């Protein structure tokens, strides 16, 4: 009995995200963005090499302007510390992308003409899942922190059940597979068997930069440098590890419940 | 002889007896691993005791791929010799069970040999060398994992059972082996810390600290006092988060829905506080060689207010939880680990302390800020999951106490504006070899780092999870299937740290 009053006394702590903005405040280092001015694109060759070498995972690309590959970025902040005029931490956690190459960001929004098509294609596939989606997780060589952040989604702050999102023990019930880890070769068989055991329609989300690229373990004899070479990924959530909000954004993006930026309509409403 | 002196060098055939001769009531086997040299391999046994580390080493001549096993005399060497066999192909003759542990490969396969300078392409694991399943009348096996119900790290437990008891469990962490030891080689000292943080992500601070302690021993660039206290602040927040996580898994297994919700709420608030301190929920990129990357991003008074609030809430709910019979019934007498086994195996962390073995390197070999801070160590007697839970509860209060002391010291040193140096930058190019350690929430983390001209040529990381997971099969003396989740949660280990 005393437990009951404990919960009630706390009041409501649950986030209203995605219907209202939420986050950890401006100091949270969700991701690295390119913030430099116009001159940055015109770096001479030696300086471009120096800038690229700031990054321990090779996430900084310099051909045709400065870009950051968030699929490789582990948010160590070396570039932000060394070249604050070029790079900055960004508290915006809505960084999930529907394709690996869309994790490479520059200062300017790049042409994403085919993105609407991509989103609509995905929306058609998952139409039946929108009101209730069951999630299964599989670890393919994570460092253990991603599991904490996924598990956090069921705590009272995020309470993803309010959005019709549930975790399931069996792949037989699962619509969506959350994959973590650098693609440990020992788990690839289990990954395929788990995915094969799921009913269609089904989706795969790669959780974390390591799952997109291998991150700091990309060149190991024991990993595949992420999972994308082995299985078709629908959504990439970069981060090392991504925060629960970033993971939630990725899930909502996958099932078409994420409002399209600059518009009030969700893609679900637009496609119906 | 000690960590700052030379190692005791012995011939390989005397290695086991020398190690066994030193062990006893004063020393425990902390680690055993291979250090590749120019043309041969050196086996290194690390013994901890009397406030020091001691090294006994044996060099295998070029071309030699076997030596007499240590495990026969020192049971705690079991997993270490299996790991050496997996990674280097070196065979411990007389080992009772040299089955693959972290990397199953076909016989004759190339081995990664981290630190040898070998270039190794992708190695494909082969399940054929894993032991065929058992043995004994009426016995059958249940394979649990590597994909299990719930959001867990990948591991397989092969349970050998006549029906309800678990006389033997084979623990197979190899599925998520990532080759982290190999990943360190060739990196710069600065980049190495990023990988150390990811050896065991839930113990980011402890691993980064142990790695940096080793680097600082080589460079001589000790962190300034303020930097050391900032490390303590983050390390103790990490400890509270991990102990809460273990408790959360207990409440989930016991079906205590409200307690589960309450504790996950506190853990989330704690993770958000950690994010406010440094921009990252796990304290990534805080610890750097020579200190910390910078001062906390918020003021000391704000940290203190949040810490007070957290402690009040956690105390209230843990007090109620520890008075909830339907919870305690599941932990009491569950997974009893007798101190005799733990002492022989040199068990670490809350697992050992729950059985009355008070090994905590914050006290036995104090490092960094802990040299100037006081705390009482937690200890239990019963050795069951409940004793481990009580130890973790006490350690949470101990951590809050340490955090307040660290904040107090920082207030004296740095004031509200955090205006004290946080990092000592080493000059010149580093070369050398040294140990570093830290008390992670799971127990002692040990690193041996070798640097040549600023480049890492060998890093051996030994997480407490690797050392303690070897004891998992011993924790089921009279336990049944439904105790499994509690025993696993009461170990509180990370598979990433164990699989390497």
Image: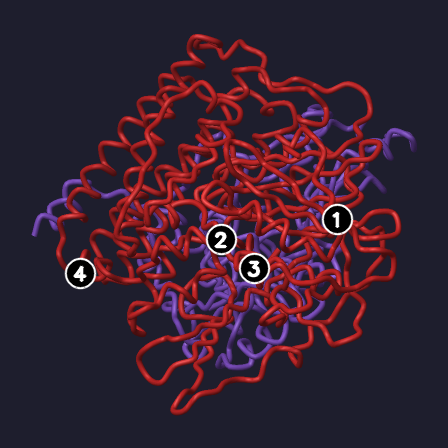
Residue with the mark numbered 2: A247
Disc 4 from disc 3: Cα separation: 38 Å
Residue B308 numbered mark, or none: none
Callout 3 secondary element:
loop
Q: Classify residue A98 as left or right of residue B42.
A: left
Secondary structure under the numbered disc 4 in the rendered image: helix
From the image, tell me which residue sits under label 1: B35
User: What residue is shown at x 74% (from left), y 50% (from top)?
Assistant: B58
Q: Quadrant of the C terminus of chain B?
A: bottom right
Q: Are marks 2 and 4 on the same chain?
A: no
Quadrant of the rendered structure where residue A13 is?
Answer: top left
Give the residue number, with chain letter if any, for mark 4.
B329
- Left or right, A32 with reference to B358: right
Q: Quadrant of the N terminus of chain B?
A: top right
Q: Which mark is residue B73?
A: 3
Q: Closer to the N terminus: mark 1 or mark 4? A: 1
- Report crowding for label 3: few under 14, some 14 to 19, many 20 or more residues within 10 A (C-alpha): some
* Residue A206 in sight here: no
Is the residue marked by circle 2 packed among few (<14), some (14-19), or many (20+) residues within 10 Å? many
Q: Nearer the viewer, mark 1 or mark 4?
A: 1
Q: Nearer the viewer, mark 2 or mark 4?
A: 4
Q: Nearer the viewer, residue A194 or B118?
A: B118
Question: How far is the residue under mark 1 from the one under mark 4?
Answer: 47 Å
Q: Chain of mark 3?
A: B
Residue B349 vs A138, above or below: the answer is above
């Amino acid at each position: 009995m005393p437990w009951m009053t404990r919960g009630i006394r706390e009041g409501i702590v649950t986030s209203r995200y995605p219907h209202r903005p939420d986050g950890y405040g401006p100091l949270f280092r969700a991701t690295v963005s390119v913030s430099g001015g116009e001159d940055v694109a015109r770096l001479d060759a030696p300086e471009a090499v120096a800038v690229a070498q700031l990054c321990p995972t090779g996430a900084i690309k310099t051909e045709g302007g400065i870009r950051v590959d968030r699929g490789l970025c582990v948010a160590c902040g070396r570039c932000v510390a060394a070249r604050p005029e070029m790079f900055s931490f960004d508290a915006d956690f809505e960084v999930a992308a529907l394709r690996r190459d869309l994790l490479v960001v520059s200062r300017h929004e790049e042409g994403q003409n085919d993105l609407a098509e991509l989103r609509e294609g995905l929306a058609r596939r998952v139409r039946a899942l929108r009101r209730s989606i069951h999630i299964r997780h599989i670890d393919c060589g994570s460092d253990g922190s991603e599991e904490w952040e996924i598990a956090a989604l069921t705590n009272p702050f995020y309470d993803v059940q309010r959005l019709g999102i549930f975790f399931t023990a069996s792949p037989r019930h699962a619509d969506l597979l959350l994959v973590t880890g650098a693609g440990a070769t020992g788990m690839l068989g289990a990954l395929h068997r788990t995915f094969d055991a799921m009913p269609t329609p089904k989706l795969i989300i790669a959780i974390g930069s390591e799952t997109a690229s291998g991150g700091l373990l990309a060149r190991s004899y024991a990993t595949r440098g992420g999972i994308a070479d082995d299985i078709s990924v629908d959504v990439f959530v970069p981060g090392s590890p991504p925060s629960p909000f970033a993971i939630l954004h990725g899930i909502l993006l996958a099932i078409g419940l994420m409002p399209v930026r600059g518009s009030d309509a969700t893609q679900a409403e637009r496609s119906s | 002889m000690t960590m700052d002196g030379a190692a005791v060098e012995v011939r390989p055939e005397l290695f086991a007896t020398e190690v066994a001769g030193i062990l006893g009531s004063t020393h425990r086997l902390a680690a055993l691993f291979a250090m590749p040299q120019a043309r041969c391999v050196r086996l290194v046994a690390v013994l901890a005791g009397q406030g020091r580390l001691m090294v006994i080493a044996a060099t295998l001549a070029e071309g030699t791929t076997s030596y007499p096993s240590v495990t026969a005399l020192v049971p705690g060497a079991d997993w270490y010799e299996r790991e050496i066999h997996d990674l280097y192909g070196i065979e411990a003759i007389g080992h009772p069970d040299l089955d693959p542990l972290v990397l199953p490969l076909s016989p004759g396969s190339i081995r990664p040999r981290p630190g040898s300078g070998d270039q190794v392409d992708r190695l494909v694991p082969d399940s054929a060398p894993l032991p065929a399943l058992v043995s004994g009348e009426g016995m059958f096996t249940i394979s649990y994992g590597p994909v299990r119900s719930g959001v867990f790290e990948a591991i397989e437990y092969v349970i050998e059972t006549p029906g309800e008891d678990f006389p033997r469990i084979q623990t197979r962490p190899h599925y998520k082996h990532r080759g982290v030891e190999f990943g360190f080689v060739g990196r710069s000292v600065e980049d190495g810390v990023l990988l150390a943080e990811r050896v065991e992500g839930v113990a980011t601070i402890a691993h980064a600290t142990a790695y940096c302690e080793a680097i600082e021993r080589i460079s001589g660039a000790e962190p300034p006092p303020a930097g050391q206290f900032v490390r303590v602040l983050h390390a103790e927040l990490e400890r509270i988060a991990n102990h809460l996580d273990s408790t959360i898994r207990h409440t989930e297994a016991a079906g205590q829905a409200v307690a589960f919700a309450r504790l996950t709420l506190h853990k989330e608030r704690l993770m958000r506080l950690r994010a406010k301190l440094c921009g990252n929920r796990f304290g990534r990129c805080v610890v750097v060689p020579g200190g910390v990357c910078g001062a906390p991003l918020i003021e000391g008074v704000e940290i203190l207010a949040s810490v007070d609030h957290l402690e009040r809430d956690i105390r209230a709910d843990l007090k109620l939880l520890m008075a909830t019979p339907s919870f305690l019934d599941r932990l009491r007498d569950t997974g009893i680990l007798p101190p005799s086994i733990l002492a022989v195996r040199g068990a670490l962390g809350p697992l050992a302390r729950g059985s009355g073995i008070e090994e905590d390197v914050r006290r036995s070999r104090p490092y960094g800020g802990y040299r100037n801070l006081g705390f009482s160590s937690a200890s239990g007697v019963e050795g069951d999951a409940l004793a481990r839970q009580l130890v973790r509860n006490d350690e949470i209060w101990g951590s809050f106490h340490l955090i307040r002391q660290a904040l107090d010291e920082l207030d004296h040193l740095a004031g509200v504006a955090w205006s004290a140096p946080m990092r000592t930058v080493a000059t010149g190019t580093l070369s050398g070899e040294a140990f570093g350690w830290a008390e992670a929430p799971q127990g002692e983390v040990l690193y041996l780092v070798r640097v040549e001209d600023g480049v890492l040529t060998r890093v051996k990381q030994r997480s407490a999870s690797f050392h303690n997971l070897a004891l998992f099969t011993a924790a089921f003396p009279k336990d049944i299937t439904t105790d499994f989740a509690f025993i696993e949660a009461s170990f509180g280990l990370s598979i990433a740290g164990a699989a390497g």
